[in-house]
Amino acid sequence: MTAPRRGTVLTVAALAVFSLLSGQGVAVADGPVVETGGAVRGQAGLTETGPEARAPKLPYLCSGKVDYPHSSHTKNYTINVHFDTACKMVAPNVSTEGSLSRSRWYGWEQLKTSKGGKKNTRKLRVVAPKGCKAGTKYRYKGQARFYVSGPQGKGSAHVYNQNDSEIKCAKR
């Protein structure tokens, strides 16, 4: 067997590095790799969308944030995740659609979907609470799409956050 030519090895190595750095829809965290469909982890600005979109800009200076899923501080045996939109200017239309999922042996199981919207606001919080069986332990992921629209343009962001270790379902 002959060794591969040097140019071939360099090309393969360069492609491997590029695919790792570009993150093509895969988020790398301390835990296992989780497909996120192009979502950004934690928080992102709502950039302009649609056929009129040019260079990225932030209509109404809004950002969307997904916190870490956690045991509810107000309801026993419940896992919560918050989806927060914050704008520096009043936005005519703000909406969010988000879901809470847990990691199972076969992949992510969607547990709860929540959505909400407000008009003429700077803030919106949507919560996805889901009851859980006492003592069970799972990793959880919250994922949301954030939208803003008005005369300044339309913007959106796709954001997720997940626990890299298991959360125990417990009394608050």
Image (cartoon, grey):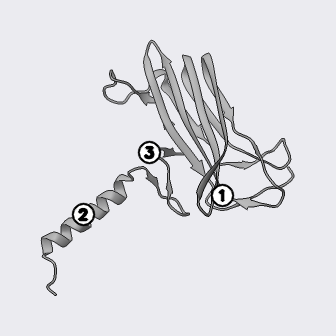
- Residue neighbourhood size for the residue with mark 1, other residues' Cα within 10 Å, grouped as few (<14), some (14–19), many (≥20): some
User: Which residue in the rendered view is the most extreme toward the front?
Assistant: 106
In this rendered view, identify the residue nearer to me: 2 or 118. Answer: 2
Give the mark, 2 or 1, whose residue is nearer the N terminus: 2
In this rendered view, identify the residue nearer to me: 63 or 70. Answer: 70
| Whether residue 7 can be seen here | yes
Disc number lying in front (3 or 2): 3
Q: Cβ–Cβ below 8 Å for labels 3 and 2?
A: no
Disc 3, SS: loop
**Distance between mark 1 and mark 3 Cα atoms:** 20 Å
Q: Quadrant of the N terminus?
A: bottom left
2 relative to 63 in the view: left or right: left
Image label count = 3
Residue that numbered label 1 is attached to = 139
Res. 104 mark = none
Quick check: 23 above or below 116? below
**Distance between mark 2 and mark 1 Cα atoms:** 34 Å
- Three-letter code for the amino acid on which mark 1 is drawn: Arg
- Three-letter code for the amino acid on which mark 3 is drawn: Gly
Residue that numbered label 3 is attached to = 38
Residue that numbered label 2 is attached to = 14
Please state the horizontal and vertical placement of residue 129, each as a whole percent of the image: 74, 41
